[in-house]
Amino acid sequence: MDGSFHTPEWHAARLASLKTTHTLTWEEYRQKQKEEELKKVELEADTDMLMREYRAQLDAERAMKLSKGRNYSSDRSTKDRKERELTDRKGRDSKRKRSKKRKHSRRGSSDSSSSSESSSSDEEEFRKSRSSSKRPKRERKHKSRGRHSRT
């Protein structure tokens, strides 16, 4: 009995298949590796170019939006803008009415004072009231506390 696992026909077929298959030589292998490397470099160059174009497009859009102004928003419609303008006008009108009422009440209190006071004292009071209204609340509180503690 033959000690091999395969028949002599199988061995002959195996040797024939080994001879017919092409194995790469070192030069062929190096050439193939260079070609693959060139393909990778070209692919990276293409992606870099696409990324630069995309960044340029984004920068152009950003510049357009910034050039339109601070309060510009493209998602707001003209209808919303008109409604906002109407509400703003109403708010301004009510503020004007309130300020007119305040002015009239100030004048009324100064008119009710004695007529012996001169107009210069009225101006001084007006200046004092304006200057005190400009101060923050904290300063006013501290100042009023100091006056009460001294007396």
Image (spheres, rainbow, N blue to C red):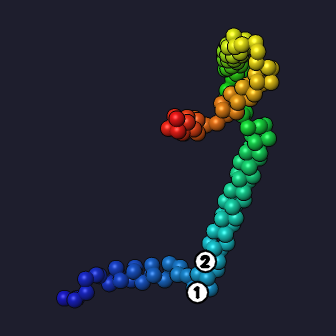
Q: Is residue 118 left or right of residue 33?
A: right
Image quadrant assignment for residue 121:
top right
Eyeballing the image, is 146 above or below 87? below
Q: Residues within 10 Å of mark 2 (few under 14, many from 20)?
A: few
Secondary structure, mark 1, is helix
Left or right: residue 56 versus residue 8 is: right
| Residue at the disc numbered 2 | 33
Residue 10 x %, y %: 34, 79
Residue 144, given in percent of the width and then of the height, sits at 55, 34
Which percent across, then down, holds residue 90? 68, 14
Please say if 11 is above or below 108.
Answer: below
Which one is nearer the viewer's eye here, 108 or 79? 108
**Type of amino acid under label 2:** Gln
Query: Mark 1 highlights which residue?
Result: 26
Residue 74 lies in quadrant: top right
Give the mark nearest the N terminus, 2 or 1: 1
Quadrant containing the N terminus is bottom left
Indicate whether 20 appears above or below 72. Answer: below
For this rendering, which residue is in front, 48 or 96?
A: 96
**Which of the 4 quarters of the picture holds residue 13?**
bottom left
Label 2 element class: helix
Specify the amino acid type for callout 1. Trp
Q: Dot 1: within a 10 Å radius of its alpha carbon, few (fewer than 14), some, or many (20 or more) residues?
A: few
The extreme left residue here reads 1
Q: Is residue 86 visible?
A: no
Q: Residue at x 28, y 81 (%)?
A: 6
* Residue drawn at (45%, 81%) of the image: 18
Look at the picture and state if 52 lies above or below 64: below
Percent x, y for residue 28?
A: 61, 82
Visible in this render: residue 72? Answer: yes
